[in-house]
Amino acid sequence: MSDEIVITTLAERPELLEKLQTFSGGWPEFMRHDPIGNTLMGRVPELFPEHCLLALEGDTLVAHGRSIPFVFPDEDRTELPAGGWDSALQWGVADHRNGRRPTVASALEISIAASHLGRGLSHDMLAAMRQNVAAMGLDTLYAPVRPNGKEDAGQPMTEYIQQFRADGLPVDPWLRVHVKAGAEILKVAPTSMVMAGSLDEWREWTGLPFDHTGEVIVPKALVPVHCDVEHNHAVYVEPNVWVQHNL
């Protein structure tokens, strides 16, 4: 990491909230329409500012990361949820509301400015997140990783995560970042995010016609989008991959 980049938290620099809120992370448009994410992700800086990491180069925000603490396991949470990212958000906000003392945390996002991609900043941000969570007395950081190196939407995620390079590391760049940092790949979260909309909304989000019933391949979608012309809707159910960092 460049010596000019400083990683801090929103709790330490609350005046940077607006920069965090307006940071463009390069998500495809259709990914911005997960109802749970739209309802709860904006509350993370408010409820958990100490879990919001900010990477600054001078006065410029060049990366950020968010995690969320929750209770796991307990009598009602015996396994990491199939709902992945959505469930982590729901558990964290619910536990905060109910005054429960968290025992673990989950990463929610690490986002790098386009100008700073390829500089190793993702490794630095993940290391900072691990250190930050450990400093709060939590001994495990989970992450429902979005393996955005997956280019074949028709390939099952369970098969994709079994692909490794000659050096034994995952072929997927984001999974590789986590494994290099010491994480273990656990399992697929098959319903980690859900985006549903009318066909007009999907046309607006993607620029595609959405004019036939069946599977639609959308650029940057990890699996096909299910389109139903007769009922005028399409649904994208994204699988992510649970990994575990022991801190």
Image: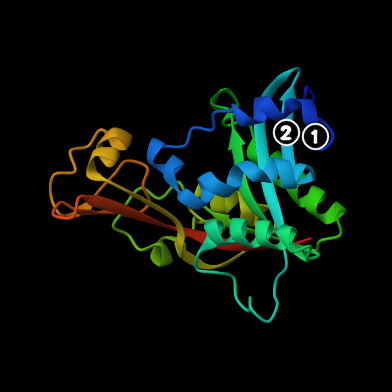
**Can residue 168 be seen?**
no
The local crowd at label 2, few if under 14, some if 14 to 19, many if 20 or more residues have their Cα within 10 Å, is: many
In this picture, residue 49 sits left or right of residue 24: right
Badge 1 vs badge 2, beta-carbon distance below 8 Å: yes
Q: Name the residue under label 1.
A: 8
Residue 54, disc: 2
Q: What residue is rendered at 38% in x and 41% in y?
A: 30
Ranked by sequence position, the earlier of labels 1 and 2 is: 1
In the rendered image, the quadrant that contains the N terminus is: top right
Q: Nearer the viewer, residue 170 or 194?
A: 194
Q: What residue is rendered at 59% in x and 70% in y?
A: 80
**Can residue 170 be seen?**
yes
Task: Give, as a three-letter code, the residue at label 2.
Answer: Leu
- Residue 151's x, y, as percent? 35, 47
Task: Give, as a three-letter code, the residue at label 1.
Answer: Thr
Q: Is residue 24 above or below residue 90?
A: above
- What's the distance in space between the residues labelled 1 and 2, CA to CA? 5 Å
Q: Nearer the viewer, residue 177 or 195?
A: 195
